Image (cartoon, rainbow, N blue to C red):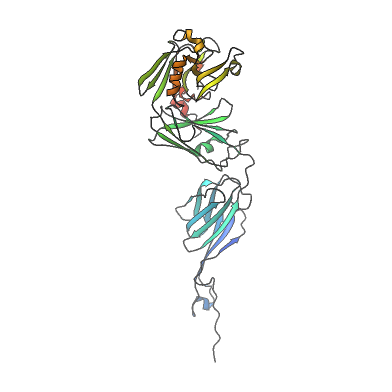
Amino acid sequence: MIAARRPVRRTAPLGRPARLTLVAGSAALGVMLTACSGTAASGSESDKGGAAASSEARISVNLRGGQATPGTPVKVTLDTGKLKSVAVSADGGEALTGRISADGRTWTSDRVAAPGTVYGIEAKNTEGGSGRAGFTTAAADKVNKLTLAPGKNTTVGIAQPLSVVFDNPVKDRAAVEKALKVSTSNNTEGSWGWLQDYSGKDRVDWRPKEYWKSGTKVTLDADLNGIDSGKSGGWFVRDYRTTFTIGAEQVVKVDLDRHRLALKRDGQTVMDVPMSAGTPGGEKASWRGTAVLMSKEGTINMRSETVGLGDAYDKMVDSSMRLTWSGMYAHAAPWNAAYFGVANHSSGCVGMSDADAGALYGQVRVGDPFEITGADAKGTVAEGNGYGAWNVSWADWQAKSAL
């Protein structure tokens, strides 16, 4: 007589990886990782009515569904055991990196989930369990964008700040500032400062404590994708990056009282020419303080009505170098030759002969400081009127940071 063979219960086929089962969760996506034993031998605990040895671990994900809220880190939590790895991919975007906690129970992404993105999650534990899950974040109802200066791969002067102008208001300035990472080739000390651009838009500039050192290489990584700029500002839906290099140490000295302009390079005077600046005593006076060369615009049409001076002039002007948004330039002004080196008698700009203006135009670069001194001025260049951050003390500038 052949004895009946007792059935043996298995929790998983031998030699196969553990299965992942998705189960419903109340506030998070629940994932069941299961690592199973082999067949129980005759006379084992299972023969005596006990269950075969098995190990189950539940993993929860803090974001779920097709309209998950963006702007928060992805968090994967294991209820028992330890995580071995977690990978979070982004359809059409950059995968999220992250870190496992010291106790092995939680993985948290380094960056937040971006709007309108499909994410896939693959989790593994140290017991051999593995599986996949996913979610999709809600699309941004409003998008914020920005304009960066200086341009990518440019060479600029020693006073050029990093400047970021936003299309929409930024209410959560701290969150935005945390995402702006500046790195330099020589560990330059600097700080962000928030201000209002001349256009009325929100703006944040990063300036060194002192002028840049010639040859410094600078990189800005604006890791903004997924950051909410706050009420009425909208979400950022991409990252930005720019790199630039600091050129020769050049400073333009403008003395309003002596009616002279000098270009110094590496501490040596390479130009010293007569000029005539703005007529003192009213709106035609020039600004004092440090202005930064914003652009070299060549020959342009200058009209007085664009700067609130009525119909005083309408001229084609050569060798035009913009110093402020409000319309202060250094340029050629041959019509004003009788006043060069004698008196300030212009409509606010620093005028020189054709030859002198052309020579200066050929040597200066965007980002060079124009240090303007003297009594014949209507005030100091404001922070947002071009790049006026150098007219603020270092302590006061640091206080403008949101962090």
Residue at position x 37%, y 19% in the image: 270
* Residue pictured at 48% horizontal, 64% vertical: 128
The number of discs equals: 0
Rendered view: 383 above or below 134: above
Visible residue check, residue 143: yes
Residue depicted at x 52% and y 78%: 48
Q: Does 267 sit above or below residue 312?
A: below
Q: Quadrant of residue 184?
A: top left
Who is closer to the viewer here, 74 or 355?
355
Q: Position of residue 369 (x, y in %)?
A: 44, 23
| Residue 326 position by quadrant | top right
In which quadrant is the N terminus drawn? bottom right
Q: Position of residue 226 (x, y in %)?
A: 56, 43
Q: Position of residue 201 (x, y in %)?
A: 58, 29
Q: In this view, which residue lies farthest toward the bottom?
A: 1
Towards the viewer: 75 or 15: 15
Residue 344 at least partly seen: no
Residue 182 sits above or below residue 196 on the image: below
142 with respect to 205 (left or right): right
User: x, y (%) of residue 209?
Assistant: 42, 28
Choose between 92 and 74: the one closer to the eye.
Answer: 92
264 vs 50: above or below = above
